[in-house]
Image: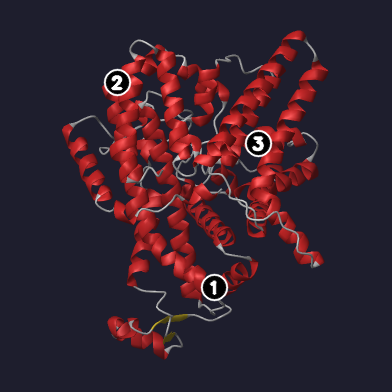
Amino acid sequence: MLFNSYVFIFAFLPVTLLGFFRLGRRWPLIAAAWLTAASLFFYGWWNPLYVWLLAVSIVFNYACGVAITRAVARGDRGMRKRMLAFAVTVNLAVLAYYKYANFFLASINHVTGSLLSFGEIVLPLGISFFTFTQIAFLADAYYGKAREYNFVHYGLFVTYFPHLIAGPVLHHAEMMPQFGLPATYRFSFENAAVGTTIFVIGLFKKVMLADNVGAYAKPVFDAAAAGVELTALEAWCGALAYTFQLYFDFSGYSDMAIGLSRLFGVVLPLNFHSPYQAVNIIEFWRRWHMTLSRFLRDYLYFPLGGNRRGAARRYVNLMITMALGGLWHGAGWTFVLWGALHGFYLVINHGWHALRARLGHDLRRSTWWGRACAGLVTFVAVVIGWVLFRAADLPAAAAMLKAMAGLNGLVLPDFWLPKWGAAGEWLAAHGVRFGDTHDLVGGGVVNWIWILLLVVWFAPNTQQLLAAYRPALALLAGHYRGRIAWRPTPLYALLSAVLALIAIFNLHRQSEFLYFQF
């Protein structure tokens, strides 16, 4: 079931809300169980056969968490270490089978010429998210941070449908206390207004921005995969179109998840905060998929040693963490290289900061033009990375990057020449080629690109507009105090209604969220 579908908006969501608050008046625990059951139904809508996998995962990890906590209480360090290692190994083994088994066998087959295969394996939706969420719970239990063990609340913590399919990756300590608050089970008009507004903004981003600009990205990447020799303009337009498709798709999902959760009186952690406004790659990863970055930092980078064992080891740890983070996104060498590329970016970024610090520069001070140049360089680096992320395979990615580097030449669409008049004639006379661009470049994609560039670089985001109403946990700095900051007024209700109607009338073109495949 998709958030951007009629059955979700007009059937599942109203019924689930009504049952939750009616039960919550007298029986909060039953209301939590109702929401857990509804979340399992939501998950099973895609493939009922995998509900058992999710249910078994919940029971197994809950039992392991309780066993680890008891070992902590007894002071039995050996038992808690063995239980943690056992539980994490089982979780990763299940994830590896469903997500990576055939990928690794295909790699072995490519090298050895063998024909090994496990047959067709259908990837369960959200397996990466509910696996990482529960590994974080096990680690919290190991360190004595997990203190509540109500099984109903734990089941809701894992299955909670706003986050189940594509995140955010939750921490036990963030969510379990909220499920125990009586106020969570009482209807609030403020929560309804804030949650509906955020959900509608996210729905509009997905349906009207991500899906529309994405229509220009697919033909370009398909052409590269088919062996078509692209020009620089075609490749850059395709790469930028995908850059904005992924941005508004993930931003839209993140908003919708936060808005839906707020309707139930639960506040999710912030997962997306205008990442294309970052002025370096370090800041980018503090703004993009923030809960995954936090998980990789706390449960992989720090255990590897972090920055505690010298600069060289720090850079190795960064490379390992980002390469594995890339592999988490998908079973393919393009994802591994994308992660490794961002690891390389981070090594350069940290090395540059270390060099400037040695030279006595104040890293907290910068000029507006310096930040603008840094932001542009960061954005271009991210776009190049997204080519690896989106390409069908390594040859297709290489073809795209070759074209973007200008090695296939720059050709402008021939139908632009008469439109530009004297300017076009002047360009043609000075060596600019106008010719066939395989119908991949037109005024439509160019207009999308420059308009969305202005939006992602300069417009306040959803959390900033509603910051006065605490839309998410761990909000970053940047409370927007302008005239357009959201308020619960008839004008904003009307604007939300208009956005909702526009999006709903276009739901016939619904598509899955891009992060569903990860």
Image vertical order of residue 474 relative to residue 28, above or below: below
Q: Is residue 488 above or below residue 33?
A: below
Which tag, 1 or 2, sits closer to the chain's start? 2
Depth check, front residue: 41 or 70? 41
Disc marking residue 18: none
Task: Give the crowd class for mark 3: few <14, some 14-19, many >=20 residues within 10 Å.
Answer: some
Residue 200 picture location, percent across and down = 30, 41
Q: Quadrant of the N terminus?
A: top left
Horizontal side of 25 relative to 249 (left or right) equals: left
Marked residue nearer the N-terminal end (3 or 2): 2
Q: Give x and y (percent) for residue 311.
A: 77, 42
Tell me the residue at 32%/54% (across/down): 208
The answer to whether residue 186 is seen in the rendering is no
Residue 86 horizontal side relative to residue 496, left or right? right
Alpha-carbon span between mark 3 and mark 2: 36 Å
Q: Residue at x 80, y 36 (%)?
A: 309
Q: Which residue is mark 2?
A: 188
3 or 2: mark nearer the eye: 2
Under circle 2, the secondary element is loop
Q: Residues within 10 Å of mark 1 (few under 14, many from 20)?
A: many
Q: Is residue 498 left or right of residue 114?
A: left
Give the amino acid type for the residue marked by disc 2 in the picture: Ser
| Left or right: where 506 falls relative to 437 | left
Q: Quadrant of residue 450?
A: bottom left
Q: Amino acid at mark 1?
A: Ala
Q: CA distance from mark 1 to mark 2?
A: 51 Å
Q: Is residue 426 visible?
A: yes
Mark seen at residue 224: 1
Name the residue carrying label 3: 297
Q: Nearer the viewer, mark 3 or mark 1?
A: 1
